[in-house]
Image (cartoon, helix red, strand yellow):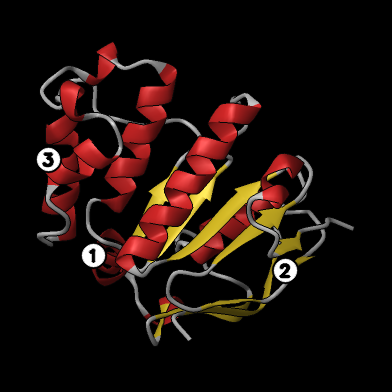
Amino acid sequence: MLFESRNLKYSHHGQKQIVFPDISLDKGESILVLGKSGSGKTTLLNLLAGLLDPEIGEVKLAGQSLSEMKGQKLDLFRGKEIGIVFQKPHLLAALTLKENLQMAHFFGKKKGQDIDRLLEELGLAHKSNSSVLTLSEGEAQRASIARALANTPKLILADEPTSSLDDENTEKVVNLLKSQAAKIGAALIIVTHDQRVKSHIPNYVEVKSE
């Protein structure tokens, strides 16, 4: 199994402990994490990315337990093996689109994918040397996906990637994430409240705060 999360529990200060459903995925498989606003979806995403330590339970990627790694070692592992598509693009405004992806290679200390080819596949080749400030909303989102894919990660985590999109673009983004995950043999987890995505990825778990 490429990715597993087991018996995860976490509580924010002064709040009731959240018990999360188990997830297991092999290469190229995908799953939705569904839940209403405030249910704990973002907390789960942070646990799966190793950005938070669970109080109980374990997250394993490619046989490595995230909680057994700390500091720089965990940061490097995350940079190499986990691609995160944030709700907001978080691109570096001072850099061109291509330079933003090159930074992902630099921080992950990994050659990763051929950037020109990746931008071509995502329909962004014409923006390669442009400031990211010139990107449309849809282009900025695809750029965020490109950056997450740059290091050929083993796990792709996408946080609400369709929340501001119409039905047509929702389908395009989900299919793009699925096809790219299948191409590089990554596991894909989409964290969302968007029920429309279920028609594209029927495999799902739900996060419910008590």
Q: Secondary structure at mark 3?
A: helix
Q: Residues within 10 Å of mark 3 (few under 14, many from 20)?
A: few
| Residue 161 seen from this side | no
Residue 178, percent across and down? 47, 55
Residue where numbered disc 2 is placed: 20
Answer whether labels 1 and 2 touch (C-beta < 8 Å): no
Q: Secondary structure at mark 2?
A: loop
Q: Residue at x 39, y 87 (%)?
A: 63
* Towards the viewer: 164 or 10: 164
Q: Is residue 21 left or right of residue 48?
A: right
Residue 71, percent across and down? 30, 66
**On screen, residue 61 above or below 94:** below
Q: How far apart, in angstroms, are the residues tagged by discs 3 and 1?
A: 24 Å
| Residue 84 seen from this side | yes
Q: Is residue 37 left or right of residue 141?
A: right
Sequence-first tag of 1 and 2: 2
Sequence-first tag of 3 and 2: 2
Residue where numbered disc 1 is placed: 76
Q: Residue at x 54, y 80 (%)?
A: 4
Q: Amino acid at mark 2?
A: Phe
Residue where numbered disc 3 is placed: 116
Answer whether labels 3 and 1 touch (C-beta < 8 Å): no
Residue 38, percent across and down? 76, 43
**On screen, residue 167 above or below 109:** above
Which label belongs to residue 182?
none
Q: Amino acid at mark 3?
A: Asp
Q: Amino acid at mark 1?
A: Leu
* Towards the viewer: 109 or 179: 179
Q: Is residue 155 left or right of residue 149?
A: right
Disc 3 versus disc 1: nearer the observer = 3
